[in-house]
Amino acid sequence: MAGFKERVFSGVQPTGNLHLGNYLGAIKRFVELQSGRDCIYCVVDMHALTAQLYQPDLASQIREVTAAFLAAGIDPKAHIVFNQSQVSAHAELAWIFNCVARLGWMNRMTQFKEKAGKDRENASLGLYAYPSLMAADILLYRATHVPVGEDQKQHLELTRDIASKFNNDFAAPIAERGFGEGFFPLTEPLIGGPAARVMSLRDGSKKMSKSDPSDFSRINLTDDPDTIAQKVRKAKTDPEPLPSEEAGLAGRPEAENLVGIYAGLAERSKEEVLREFGNAQFSAFKSALVDLSVERLGPIGSEMKRLQDDPGYIEAVLADGAARARAIAAETMAAVKDIVGFVRL
Ligand code: AMP
Ligand code: TRP
């Protein structure tokens, strides 16, 4: 968006079991976006409470996501890495956004419906307000670009709706303060590539997820090479050989998923992968996929473990990131409070 400094923001919840979907859909792309841009990557621990209130291992899960960011190649000196709860402005701005967002908008959020399930009366208010906190995460830094997996698309549309309503409803005080283009940018989602939606290895119709009870449904970033090999070999397939063109993947979700994973890891398109493996049997393709997965994920997993053995270092990275995030957040909040009309003393 013209008039706004290009800034990338994204977040990952510390809910345990970071997996290949998180890596290909999000973290790997965070790494790629670093050059030539300002990036802020956040461990969204306040969001994690919406999954389960008491998580005895929350602190180590926060360190695990931080370790994954660093092990994948995010540079915490050139960019900002921190955990959400350390910058209290996230909660402050979320409150204002709770007053901007309309019930009708929130009621359309499909992820809330999925997560709340049948017992909606018993879902927390936090789970319902989750997308409003997510909008606050992004707009607190007036971020222009947000890399995420496909499942976050609707939340980013809501973020734009919130920014737009804030800009319109407060147009007069915004203009008075010289923010001609509107105070908040209309953030662009960065969703894409061959692996924006990685599916379960056991069921090609379900997303690969941290909460799937079967560990064989996902490859965790900390899985050792033998476990990765076992999971790929056991992955569900169909009896046909691979097609030589992408159109041949239609109606074959498991085949499409494995080809997408290969393409994501190899940094090639699905079309290119099929050019190489068209007509191959799954046994041969899976062997190649095991080798590629171990080659790409092995070093990340072992670096994560090494970093997690040094919690002092991880916490120093988070503390430094939080201090820098707080400084940007404070500027935004001062302007927001003036725009809204709060008395600032
Ligand atoms: P979460 O673990 O829900 O905080 O997700 C962190 C990031 O990983 C978000 O950008 C998600 O969109 C992305 N993500 C999660 N699961 C998948 C998946 N199965 N495929 C692709 N991206 C995913
Ligand atoms: N909702 C995102 C997820 O589950 C995590 C998240 C929270 C996020 N705040 C964000 C992602 C801000 C991008 C930007 O994956």
Image: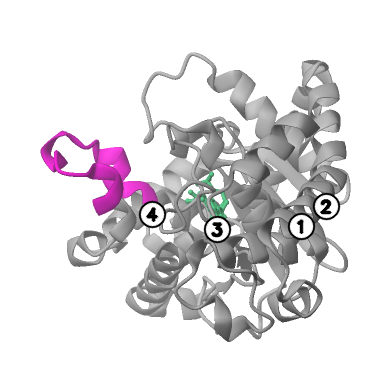
Residue shown at the point (85%, 47%) measured from the top left: 73
- Front of the two marks 1 and 4: 1
Main SS of the magenta segment? helix
The disc, 1 or 4, on the residue closer to the chain's N-terminal end is 4
Between disc 2 and disc 1, the foreground one is 1
Residue 175 location in percent, x, y?
48, 81
Q: For the residue with label 2, is its CB less than 8 Å from the closest atom of ligand 1? A: no
* Mark 1 C-beta to ligand 1 under 8 Å: no
Determine which residue is flagged by label 4: 131
Dot 2: within a 10 Å radius of its alpha carbon, few (fewer than 14), some, or many (20 or more) residues? some
Inspect the image, locate mark 4, and give the three-letter code of the amino acid beneath it: Pro
* Ligand 2 within 8 Å of the CB at mark 4: yes
Find out whether the residues at labels 1 and 3 contact each other: C-beta distance under 8 Å.
no
Q: Which residue is mark 3?
A: 138
Q: CA distance from mark 1 to mark 4?
A: 43 Å
Q: Of 328 and 67, which appears nearest the observer?
A: 67
Q: Earlier in the sequence, mark 4 or mark 2?
A: 4
Task: For residue 345, say whether it is visible.
Answer: no
Q: Which residue is mark 1?
A: 284
Q: Amino acid at mark 3?
A: Ile
Q: In whole angstroms, how far apart are the C-alphas of marks 1 and 3?
A: 43 Å
Q: Secondary structure at mark 3?
A: helix
